[in-house]
Amino acid sequence: MKLPSLKPYWRVTLWYLAFGVAWIFFTDCLVGSVARDVRALTGYQTLKGWFFVGLSGLLIFQITRAAFRRHEAHEREKMRVYRKTVEGAHHILLNYLNQMQLVTMEAERCKDFDAETARIAHEVSDEAAAELMKLAALEKITEDEIHAVVYRRTRKAE
């Protein structure tokens, strides 16, 4: 039976609680059976506390490091999916732009076709291809960075 996946903060907390309870129970039993007087008991309790701090720190380190590594792997996967999505959209849109350029070239062969319209069609196609390249070249993928690339023209006009 697979246990439900817990948020990292719950996993760390539960491990720490389980470790702490087990530590106190077992080490108190051990110290109680070994200590012969109050002074020895006090010394053992102090050592026990130091070991607890060290071992619990190590436990927390291991758990949080594992959670961080899972988080990093998840972020890498998201980046890979983003890049593949942009690559696919780039491919589709470039194919479309190429087809539109063919249509424009055919239209230019017609003697009644407006040359200014053909120039605008070429300019728009080239601009769209350049914008796609900028989006694909983003290094830092955040909502703000994507927005800045995609809507850059809108901000200039304001």
Image: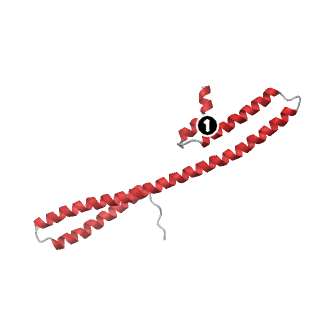
Between 90 and 151, the one nearer to me in the picture? 90
Where in the figure is residue 86, as x and y percent of width and height?
63, 46
In the rendered image, the vertical position of residue 148 relative to residue 49, given as above or below: above
Mark 1, other Cα within 10 Å: few <14 / some 14–19 / many ≥20 = some
Tell me the residue that label 1 is attached to: 150
Between 111 and 55, the one nearer to me in the picture? 111
Q: Image check: 96 left or right of 136?
A: right
In the rendered image, the vertical position of residue 122 relative to residue 40, given as above or below: above
State the image quarter where residue 117 is shown: top right
The residue shown at (76%, 33%) is 121
State the image quarter where residue 32 is shown: bottom left
Q: Regarding mark 1 in the picture, which secondary structure is present there?
A: helix
Between 87 and 61, the one nearer to me in the picture? 87
Where in the figure is residue 96, as x and y percent of width and height?
74, 43
Q: Quadrant of the C terminus?
A: top right
The residue shown at (66%, 49%) is 88
Q: Image check: 106 left or right of 61?
A: right
Where in the figure is residue 147, as x and y percent of width and height?
57, 37
Color theme of the render: secondary structure
Residue type beneath disc 1:
Val
In the rendered image, the vertical position of residue 154 relative to residue 43, given as above or below: above
The residue shown at (81%, 27%) is 115
Q: Residue furthest bottom?
A: 33
The residue shown at (34%, 61%) is 59
Where in the figure is residue 107, as x and y percent of width and height?
84, 34
